[in-house]
Image (cartoon, rainbow, N blue to C red):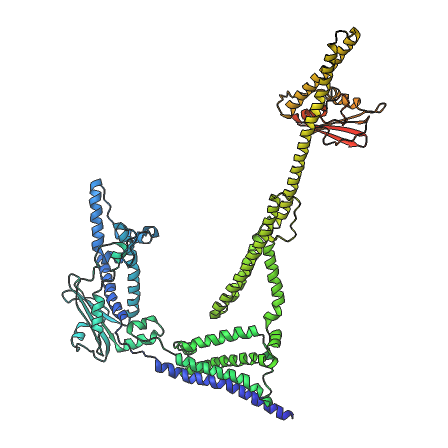
Amino acid sequence: MDTKLKNSRKLAVVLVILVILLPSLAMMIIRPHYIKGQSSTDPNFTTSSFMGTLTHSNYVLYAEEKQRENQAAMIPFDIFFPSALNKQNTKENEEDSKSGSKSNVSSQEISDAALDDENFPSSKYKDSYGDEYGEYSSKEAIIASANTLSSKFSRWDDNFSTLRSYLQYEVRDENGKVVDSNATEELAPLLSQTKPDSLDKKYAFGAVIKYDESGNVSQAEFFSGKASNATQLLNEQVRQNPCSDFDSQYGMDAPFQKPQGRTYIYLMTAENLATFLESSPGSGYLEYLGVDTYRSTDDLSIVFITLLGMVAAAALLLPFIKPLQIGNEKIFRAPFEFVFIVASFILGFSLSMSVDGGAMNNEPIYNVLHSIGVPKGLASVLQYFWGFIGWAFIFAVCYWAAGCVRGIFVIGPKRYIQERVIIYRVWPWAKSAVKNVYNSMLHVNLKDDTTKVLIKVVLINFIILGFISLMWVWGIGALIIYSIALFFLLRKYCNDLQKQYHRLLDATNQLADGNLNGTIPEELGVFEPFREEIAKIQSGFKKAVDEEVKSQKMKTDLITNVSHDLKTPLTAIITYVDLLKDKNLPDEERLHYIDVLEQKSTRLKLLIEDLFEISKATSRNVTLNIMDVDIVSLMQQNLLVNITKYAMPRTRVYVDMENDEKRVRISMKNISATELTFNPSEITERFVRGDASRNTEGSGLGLAIAKSFVELQGGTLQIMVDADLFTVEIIFPKP
């Protein structure tokens, strides 16, 4: 039984290996032959790009010749737009002659200015339709054109530098004399011996471009081993103005100066062409020679996807063959997220390689091994083996991923999600974390520094976007999902903020309607600090209302008390005046009535004086002459009289005085002769008396006057009552 089991396991391993290796071998065989059949490295020289390169080569050689003649560095603008520079200098000389100065524009000045972005105001240009948005001055036009031409010329020089070592060229003047050449022999005789439409097999192509003394093209011919329209393309290129857009862009009306009285001859041997093509695989320069560098491999991609599907089907179906007893190994129980990421990256990368015909054709292993001395045969074998291992790894990943996904059908989707989806297992924790972060954002204390909250949000967003960026092309899909989730999260956040705002608004509206006892039962989130502020406002309003009610009551009491205190002596005066009118009144009674009148009028006078004093004191309309006084004598004239006057007979009066560095404190205490039923906080108000019936002689202004004058001097007067114990405390701060 054990032997049978071992044999079944060996058969299963062999089958799995074959499922992986056979598609790998198929890709190793099919892909190179397919790509080779699809590729084309034969140049046809019929691209305008290559003709443009030859034309621009004329300008590079012309510039080099000018540099040699002048024996100085010249910028391209100085060579190809000399008339623009001369015209500008003539214009400036005419302007300078009027002012007696001289300031020509030099090529060095243009070169320096062209590097300064401030010389190119972005608001001054014309668009491609000719609509004028602004105009350059003539000097600005020169600087802008010089900068653009320098960029163009740099590209021309780079392209010609690539071809220079493979290309033979010759430059002749108007007399046919060679002025520049890199050829070992003269090229003109060679081209004159060829047929008009072909060259000797030794040469791949040749070209002749001739300019007359005015810079006009008088000849442009292209020769190759195959008949083509290359000559027509060359003529079209050499007759074009490479800077024709300068006038519309910069408003610079100056011609491009082409080479004058020069003939340019180019010749490339077939051997040099082959070397160039071999040394530039994947290079953009092959396109200049008309080489089709793009290899369509759509069919190959379909074959690759089909093989992947077959391997995946095998991974799903082989475990159903029970004798094989495969498919339940631990390797196939990997978490879904790990399988998805690895399979997506590996299979997606391999699919892109199958689509790109140029991928893996550079044979890096072969090149490295050959460069260190490994024989070509061995290097080719090792390169082939490396490629085979790569394809085997890709199909092994496909088999493993399909085997892992097979668990969905074996244990069921629900159990698969519960056991092998990490997100499901961490979802409660993640949900709690998200909820905590969300609640922390909803309950931000606006009184505190919110920097920590912002840093937390930015870091979380950075981590999420960091993971998304690692997902390669699938990152776009993840970014879309993240953006949608973020939209709904922010919408919920905004809705919650609106609800909290409306709760706060309702509370303020209740406050505005006069409801000073309203409460906010629900949370306010970020507006929670306003709960305390609203409570303070309610408390302040209540206090203000109570004060206002108290003030109104005191005003009413004041009017009543003043009326009573004024009416009592006044009534007595009127009564006794009427009695004195009696002619039969005895002299003794008349004198008594006169004494009563004097007492009542004196009391009325004192009451009016007290009113006058309290009025001045409360209105602060008192001029104080601050000086050092005998505080003991001062206390005897006012408070000491009151404290003895209203004390219970045969009781003691206590006077306590303290003098320290910061203040002077006076405290007076007595046992009241009558029951103390008044409010201590109101007894110092005007016309408020301890005798509510107001039958005693007091005016109710003494304590009010005392308090006002104490406060005018910067002190405080406070009344305290404990049963029948009456206490007055005065504090004067020291300057």
Q: Position of residue 640 (x, y in %)?
A: 77, 22
Q: Position of residue 103 (x, y in %)?
A: 24, 46
User: Is 271 on the left or on the right of 635, as rendered?
Assistant: left
Rendering quarter of residue 339: bottom right
Rendering quarter of residue 31: bottom left
User: Is 41 on the left or on the right of 381, as rendered?
Assistant: left
User: Is 570 on the left or on the right of 424, as rendered?
Assistant: right
User: Who is closer to the viewer here, 562 or 212?
Assistant: 562
Q: State whether residue 651 is above or below residue 247.
A: above
The C terminus appears in which quarter of the rendering?
A: top right
The N terminus appears in which quarter of the rendering?
A: bottom right
Q: State whether residue 254 is above or below residue 429.
A: above
Q: Position of residue 93 (x, y in %)?
A: 21, 46
Q: Is residue 214 visible?
A: yes
Q: Position of residue 51 (x, y in %)?
A: 25, 70
Of all residues shown, which one is farthest toward the right? Answer: 650
Counting every numbered tag in the picture gives: 0
User: Is 718 on the left or on the right of 314, as rendered?
Assistant: right
